Image (cartoon, grey):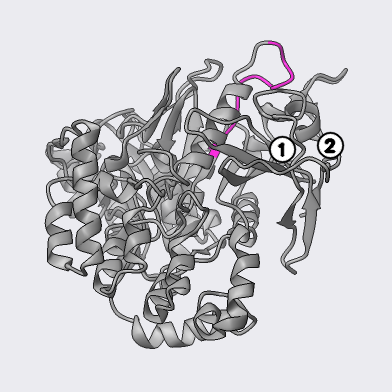
Amino acid sequence: MAVTATTIPEYDDQQPESSIPESQVLIIMTGGTICMQRSPSGFIPARGFQESCLARVPTFNDGSHPRPVDVVINEAGDRKSYQSLRTPPSSYGRQVRYTVFEFEELLDSSSIDAKGWAEIARTIYRNYTLFDAFVVLHGTDSLAYTCSALSFMLQNLGKPVILTGSQAPMLELQNDAADNLLGSLVVAGHFMIPEVCLYFNYKLFRGNRATKVAASDFAAFDSPNAPPLAITNSMRTHVAWDLVNRPTNIEHFSIQTNLDTTHVACLRIFPGIKPEMLEAVLKLEGLKGLVLETFGAGNAPGGQDNAMTKVLADAIKRGIVIVNITQCLTGSVSPVYAPGMSLTKAGVVAGLDMTTEAALTKLSYLLALPDATPESVAKNMSISLRGELTETSHPVFRHPEGGLPERAKILTALGYAIAQGDLERVKDILRGEHEWLLNEADYSGNTPLHLAATSPSISILRYFLLQGASVHIRNRAGRTPLFLAASAGLSDHVLLLRKSGAHLHSDEQAVAELYAKQRPGVWGLAGVGSKAIKDVEEEGGKRYSNGSVGNGNGVVGSASS
């Protein structure tokens, strides 16, 4: 799929670059109401979205004309230089520099399919190491489906991917587009939330938990069975860090694009439905999976002589995976009533509190995995892969955060323990719901992972990664943990970070290349040089083939959690 660049005033070589810390975000324009404009034949997509809608607005453009940025535009890896814009400084003392990458063929939200999802995923994958975060502009009709699909397609995601759209075009006088896009940019550029999210009407939802609840209201989306990950008010954005889902695998970011959407179906149970109707769907040629929307807590009519249940059981014996989802907006499938219990006994998988969108896309994702079997798919449908369902229900007690002195005291104690290589002391400090520590930064903007990157104990580094600490956060000097580990000459630390998906930020490359001339070995392992990736894969595979670590959470730069 081809793309087109926008044209805005050229970069001014006489104007110095901003000295304020900044994040780089790629906005991927796929289409939708947000980019529409009036025409004699009705609303049509507006080309040159960056120039026509963003460059003229002070909240999206501080007028500094920053340097262009490179964007990878195709599978061959070809790069194209795009003009960028920079937002004014936020209340966190940070700016967001971004560019808009437009699909030449804008996707129709109401008719998007796995091909369109794959194109979005590939665009993110190609540009993953060039940007700190990604914002995807998309039509609202199928936005919840796309969010859910991408959450499964983007594997071991360590950076924010935020989807948004609008109910009214940005070029209309009264619209929600500006607030939705600006809110998405601020969250993406300030907070390292390594999930596929949906931002709408000042709320950030986990993408695979969201569903569209209104056709015209500005509050078009909700997350009925999971609270928002973040809420924006007039002062700042409040992130519920204890709710953020983090990857915990020693694997690089990857994508799976071959979702098996053509072999799954969704059927809503209704009073009076006949077994023959259900059987006709289940006998569709090539059908591998069915999402069954049932009453209440997962109930469906058994039919005379349990004919309906028998139809389901026979289909399951033929290898079709059937997932039970409630028609209710809130709640979970639970076999507490006899009708629901009979479905479970027949082999129907309880989808718990998944949305229909999440169940359908997850089923498509699992069916397309290598070596997938009906048994493995059925088993994984009841397991939370990306936070899409609640496996168990239990009370959640939040630790009061207390004042700044207490936070500083705990962070200081943790810093000493890391410097001394005292793993047990580190574990003791993190016990008691001190998850916020993973997101906290000291006066230099160093998170615990930055400190662990130069700690004498690699076990502490591994421990933080296992807790979901982000390898992508940069300190106030713009340095990643990987850069610090390489600067310290700690090859094992570098290998573990690289195995976890870490890479040098584009702003670090020039300095790293200079250092590599003096110490090519450790910097080669860090990703500098043509053989770097191969060396890391081979050497890292030998040393760190067992265990698992995570690569995302926290804050981009120095914004507080």
What crowding class fits label 1: few (fewer than 14 Cα within 10 Å), some (14-19), or many (20 or more)? Answer: many
Residue on which the image places disc 1: 85
Q: Pointer 1 and pointer 2: residues touching (CB < 8 Å)? A: yes
In terms of depth relative to the viewer, which is nearer, 165 or 488? 488
**Is residue 283 visible in the rendered structure shown here?**
no
Which amino acid type is shown beneath numbered disc 1?
Leu
Q: Which quarter of the figure has residue 89?
A: top right
* Three-letter code for the amino acid on which mark 2 is drawn: Ile
Tell me which residue sits at (72%, 66%) in the image. Answer: 75
Magenta span dominant secondary structure: loop
- According to the image, label 2 marks what residue? 8
Residue 171 part of the magenta segment: yes
> Residue 555 in the image: x percent, y percent?
42, 45
The region drawn magenta spans 163-173
Query: Quarter of the image holding residue 354?
Result: top left
Residue drawn at x 73%, y 67% is 77
Q: How far separated are the C-alphas under marks 1 and 2?
A: 9 Å
Name the quadrant containing residue 228. top left
Q: Answer few, some or many: residues within 10 Å of disc 2's Cα (few below 14, many 20 plus, some between 14 and 19).
A: some
Q: How far across and how far down the image is residue 321, in percent?
A: 35, 58
Q: Position of residue 380 (x, y in %)?
A: 31, 60
Mark 1 or mark 2, which has the lower sequence index?
2
Q: Foreground residue, 13 or 147?
A: 13
Q: Is residue 533 left or right of residue 560?
A: right
**Number of the label disc, if any, that sits on residue 133:** none
Question: Quadrant location of the N terminus?
Answer: bottom right
